[in-house]
Amino acid sequence: MPKPLIAIVGRPNVGKSTLFNRLAKQRIAVVEDFAGTTRDRLYADCDIWGRTCSLIDTGGFDTHETEGYTPAIVEQAQLAIDEADIIIFVTDGREEPTTLDYDVAELLRRTRKPVILALNKVDNPQMPVSNMYALRLGEPIIMSAATGIGVAELTEHIEELLPREIEEYPKDDTIKVAIVGRPNVGKSALTNDLLGFQRSIVSPVAGTTRDAIDTPMTWKGQKVLLIDTAGMRRKSRVKADKTAVEYHMVLRSLRAIERADVVILVLDSGGVAEQDTKIAGYAHEAGKAILTVVNKWDLIEEKATETPRSSTRSEAAPVVEAVEEPEEEPKSRGQGRDKDKPKEARRSLAQKDYSGMIERYLPFISYAPIHFTSAESSWGVEAMFDDALDISKNLHLRISTGVLNDTIRRAMSEHSLPSVKGKQIKIRYATQAETSPPCIIIFCSAPDLLHFSYVRFLENSIRRKFPFRGVPLKIELRRGSGEMSKEERLKAKRDATLQETLERESETRAAKAKRLEEFGVDAEDDFDDDATVVEYMNEETDAQD
């Protein structure tokens, strides 16, 4: 059975995001003291007395405001109510019910779904609580999400309303794809186009998205978790604004990169900026598969305004099933030189110029495929996402040691190893130690003397032979065990001695703890020194005698 969905709704600034973070046991939603901080729906798994549930945070419900982001926020909250199994209606327990509270209560009664009324911000149990029975939603739960008061009672009430059936969930093979980039480059527009409905609020104003928004979907039979992130501005701009919201927006985006399998780096068609190189560097250092997307290409070439397909996806389903279509060759592909590289469509002169610019400004992710898209007209979006899921498989590729060493020997026969200061460097063997990202360890006689250009040559040779397209390849140089220098042997001896000392101390502590237990003393009790312990034991022995 699917995980039960629990939606948290209410008017603005009543503590919904604080409760969301409290139940999820992690800081996912941005929390501030002013209304309107949360705009899109946020999803997170939470544990309700041993049951795994999906939690939904929503923006403030304000049906009276018709300007700005408010109508879109209300629409997002309405979608959360429609798909939820249980609804938590959060109000401010210090105030009397407002007109908005009555409006939301009336809406929730019409849904005929289980509704829990939570009176939040009651930080002191002795505080007078407002009369919320007029909302006609049953017995309210008095609580404080900030301090944790009453949260246990809330989870108990939720557990009573959950379905009784408990089934084992199948192994999760979901591919996590994060869409990152500078503000206002079209990340949310790409997300909405892939889903087929408006999941994220889209606006010409930079900084519209504030949270990392997770949306599960199914793309041609493959389960995908699509993560739309907030735009990351330069650190100097964030410090200049001095707002906690901006800081947490960037922090959520960086965390989205860390938990993703594939990172789609969205660039503006106007050119590559310095901040783009930093964002690409975050993804590269995190060892994620990377695909570069140049969005808004319809502003450069007229052909990008053509709509290649019509969206037939559901507009309200939380899990979106993409329509199976005949496979077509993507309009554009990456610039890697891999053997398994798919055939590319002919690129225009403008696309070639932009690709050259990316290679100059982002040389450290030269392995990343490059796509040109227009989220406005859906041009190139489907081919781009097919390629993003395709390169995710390369993260888990493992090469046998024999085939890897044969590849390196062939590369060495083409370009022999250089000699440094009359000393010939020798490569003994290589092996792949890790996957996701792939890490290859090369054992050689003098790793400190091997020039980085030759290491890059070996990396390119490996990439030509094996399908590592779109993923970073880490190469680590190590000295063979029989070729350690005098200093390295002394360091290894010191490390071994230190390890033996630590093990002896651990055995001594274990023996002391066992001795204390015989006298009924907790091993974690604080004693000033060993003499105090011995004195305490002697007193216990005398008392027993």
Image: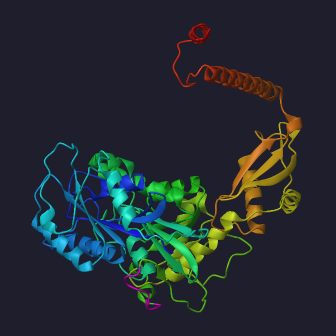
Number of marks in the rendered image: 0
State which quadrant residue 538 falls in: top right
Q: Does 363 lie within the magenta span?
A: no
Above or below — where is 7 with respect to 13? below
Q: Which residues are magenta?
A: 308-317
Q: Residue at x 61, y 86 (%)?
A: 329
Left or right for 162, reference 324 = left
In the image, residue 337 lies at what x, y percent? 70, 70
Frontmost residue, 69 versus 519: 519
Left or right for 234, reference 459 = left
Above or below — where is 212 with respect to 333? above
In the image, residue 520 lies at what x, y percent? 58, 22
State which quadrant residue 506 falls in: top right
In the image, residue 33 lies at what x, y percent? 22, 51
Frontmost residue, 509 versus 255: 509
Residue 123 visible in the current orientation: yes
Frontmost residue, 82 versus 436: 82
Q: Residue at x 87, y 45 (%)?
A: 426
In the image, residue 377 lies at what x, y percent? 40, 85
Residue 352 visible in the current orientation: no
Magenta-colored segment: predominant secondary structure: loop
- Tell me the quadrant of the picture where the C terminus can be found: top right
Q: Residue at x 53, y 75 (%)?
A: 371
Frontmost residue, 85 versus 398: 85
Query: In the rendered view, how is the structure colored?
Result: rainbow
